Each structure stands twice: as C-alpha cells, then as structure tokens.
Amino acid sequence: MRATIYHWTKWRPSSLDKYQVNLPLAIYEELADIRSYIREELKSPDAADKKIQELIAGLRSLEIFPERGFNVDERSKKGPLVPGQLTRGLPIKKDYIAIYNIDESQKVVNVRYLVASKSDYMRLFK
C-alpha cells in the first residue's frame, strides 16, 4: 500500500474561504497619523514605511480565520459594540490592536478601530 504524501505548498485556501475586510476612513487616517509621527517626530522614514506595511499585513490577515481575535465584549461594561455581533480584538505586532466585528452571513470583517496596545482602548466601550 502506497502512502499518500500531501505537500503543504500545494494547499491554497480558495477565495470562498476568505473574508472581505472593510476599513473605514478613520483607519486610513490613523495609519497616516502613525506614519507621519514616525517619519517626522522620530525622524525615521524607513521605520515608518516598515510599520505601515506590518499594520496593513496584520489587517489583511483577517481575511483568513478572523475568529482568532480575543473577545472584547466580555471585557466591556457597556455590552457589545454592535448588537448581535461579537466584538474581537487582534494584536498586530504587539504595538496595535485591531477592534472588529465579523458578519458571518456576508463573510465580511468590519474593522472599527486601530488602537495602540498601550492605550486604554477599553474606554471606547465605557
């Protein structure tokens, strides 16, 4: 009997497995502010570009398995950010957290906030 060998390089998630990630204008503005701060205040254009690339890659990673984020609603005193949808948080490179909801019926991830992980991001839910 021959053993079947599966090659991981041949496995690719189909487009049906992916979620659409929606970013509101406020997220783009936050990314621009982060880039500007690192470029101008820290005088490091290369680091600014690298940080933005990392953040975008982290946000895009929500296309596949967005459920991996932690439950933000259970830490909130106010209840769910969006009634009927669980609010999740995904740390991105230890510096930032993407706060988002998943619309399973549409296979859409709606990113609500991008906040510094050292900030009091729970104030958004009080």
Image (spheres, grey):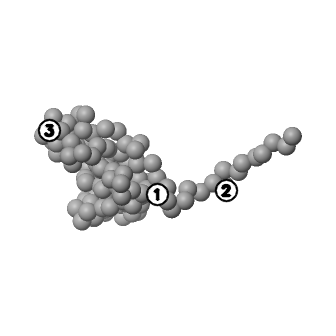
Q: CA distance from mark 3 to mark 1?
A: 31 Å
Task: Tell me the quarter of the image containing the C terminus.
Answer: top left
Looking at the rendered structure, the kind of residue marked 1 is Lys
Compare residues 118 and 26 and report the one nearer the observer.
26
Q: Is residue 19 left or right of residue 9?
A: left
Q: Which mark is residue 78?
A: 3
Residue 40 image position (x, y, % from top left): 27, 63
Residue 10 visible in the picture: yes
Q: Earlier in the sequence, mark 2 or mark 1?
A: 2
Mark 2 surroundings: few (<14), some (14-19) or many (≥20) residues within 10 A: few
Q: Secondary structure at mark 1?
A: loop
Q: Which mark is residue 18?
A: 1
Q: Secondary structure at mark 2?
A: helix
Q: Earlier in the sequence, mark 3 or mark 1?
A: 1
Is the Cβ of the residue at disc 2 closer than 8 Å to that at disc 1?
no
Looking at the rendered structure, the kind of residue marked 3 is Lys
Residue 116 image position (x, y, % from top left): 27, 47
The residue tagged 2 is 10
The number of discs equals: 3
Image quadrant where residue 43 sits: bottom left
Residue 64 image position (x, y, % from top left): 46, 52
Residue 55 visible in the picture: no
